[in-house]
Image (cartoon, rainbow, N blue to C red):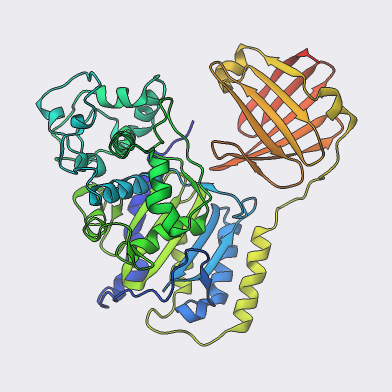
Amino acid sequence: MRTRTILIIVAAAAALALAVFLFIPLLSAPEPAWAPEYWPTDEWRASAPEEQGFDSAALAQELQQLRDDGVAIDSLLIIRNGYILLDAYFAPYDGTFTHDMASVTKSITTTLIGIAAGQGKVDLDAPMLSYFPDRTIANVEARKQAVAVRHLTGMVNGLESGCLDGDEPTLDAMRATPDWIQHALDRKMARDPGKAFCYDSPGMHILSAILQETTGMTEMEFARTNLFGPLGIHEIMWESDPQGYTDGWGDIHLLPRDAAKLGYLWLSGGVWDGRQIVPADWVKDAVTAHVHADGDDDYGYGWWVSDDSYWALGRGGQHVKVFPAFNAIVVTTASSLDFDQLEPLLRASFKDPEKPLPANPDGVAALNSTLAALAKPAESFPVGQLPPMAQVISGKTYVFGRDAADALDLTALTLKFTDATRATMIVKGRHDQDTWPVGLDGTYRQTPDGRALRGYWSDAQTFVMEMFDIGQVTYHVRFEDDRLMLSSNNFAGEFEGMATSP
């Protein structure tokens, strides 16, 4: 079960710490007029860190320190003045496949609402209920009738919710129902709309439904046409609910370099290659503090806001953080990262915000060597080798007992080995069944929901599968006669499955 509460609280509060150590002394500098030299629709341009005021040698040293300290980071991308000065990947993530951006999705959802409003398709101040005339909605009262679209974008909708401390249970309750939107709309009111911040994922999912009802397109389709397409973002994985509404609350999967384009779009005032993609007034309003959120941070419309920066934030440490006074964007993917863990790296390496540093070939060489070492897996495993057992068990279905069903929602498992480069895993739960590709050549294969899988035979009887999403989980499947034993670094003990078919 995913837990976002502590990570969101700490990561949101970390912005002030970074400002104190890094940017507060420089806040007197005027905010520059941003005039991009180019548009990274097809490709970002790169420069040596020194050209952007960063010290290569310091970056190398601090990146290695992150690894030595065991910081659970997957990637770190720093862009300044439109140029990538650091693009670091920490094994096993290598940036070749999309990463779960978690609740960064919320900033995308509100961006799409802003676009739709600019097109005249959504009225930000219209009642939420007016967009669902064909639904019979429970607990209707004056306060619920007053909830507007704008309240949903700003996390001030007033609906009954666990808020920041209890958003995960609130979200789980919605996802446990057959109709997520109906459940989200049926909730009782807990407070007057517009009065107080309450982090609420179901409210963001309602926005996805509003987009679909008003545009005739799913949120994903609308995004491809009106946002992702113009920005050159093509590799996207984004699931939908049982009724086909795109998950407006979270778990979009993007490449880090594509996620950075959202920050670049905001730096340019919503303009991309001469076209106003997002209305300028929405760009400004979205990152203007409208309500106090938590700690020292405020909230705009889908964006967290502080004095010197604004950011899209997702559980586990997914960030698209923009420092407008310095034309800087920092993008992170991680499994458990507080942004303040990057403060030593930024403070040590950002030497001059006003002019380039002298060229430093030795520092650049040290940085490149460090980046290569960080991206190298800790250990390699055999590829392209299938033991005789692979053919013996291929296609057999192994049925699990109630213990696995209760603990893992796993009732049956089938592995199929058709060649030495790829396997297929069929996983059956109590209510559904998934078919997942598994890379056998050292390369991850992604499932429809964005998880990435690869595997290998560690010995003649044991198949090891690595599943990467927000963090990596390793499963060991040992075959003995007509049974298998499943174990993992994610749970204690073993679960037994018995073969039922050839």
Whole-percent x and y of residue 22?
37, 69
Whole-percent x and y of residue 5?
38, 39
Q: Residue at x 16, y 21 (%)?
A: 140
Q: Count of labels shown?
A: 0
Whole-percent x and y of residue 271?
33, 64
Determine the image quadrant of residue 327.
Answer: bottom left
Res. 340 in view = no
* Residue that lies at the very extreme toward the bottom in this rendered image: 358
Please, is residue 126 above or below residue 187 in the view?
A: below
Whole-percent x and y of residue 87?
55, 64
Please, is residue 132 above or below residue 288 in the view?
A: above
Horizontally, is 356 left or right of 26 in the view?
A: right
Q: Residue at x 61, y 12 (%)?
A: 402
Please, is residue 95 above or below residue 36 in the view?
A: above
Horizontally, is 46 left or right of 377 in the view?
A: left
Q: Quadrant of the C terminus?
A: top right
Q: Residue at x 9, y 26 (%)?
A: 142
* Residue that lies at the very extreme toward the left in this rendered image: 142
Determine the image quadrant of residue 459.
Answer: top right
Determine the image quadrant of residue 82.
Answer: bottom left
Quick one: 390 or 211, which is closer to the camera?
211
* Residue that lies at the very extreme toward the front in this rendered image: 216
Q: Residue at x 84, y 29 (%)?
A: 390
Please, is residue 477 above or below residue 249 in the view?
A: above
Res. 237 in view = yes
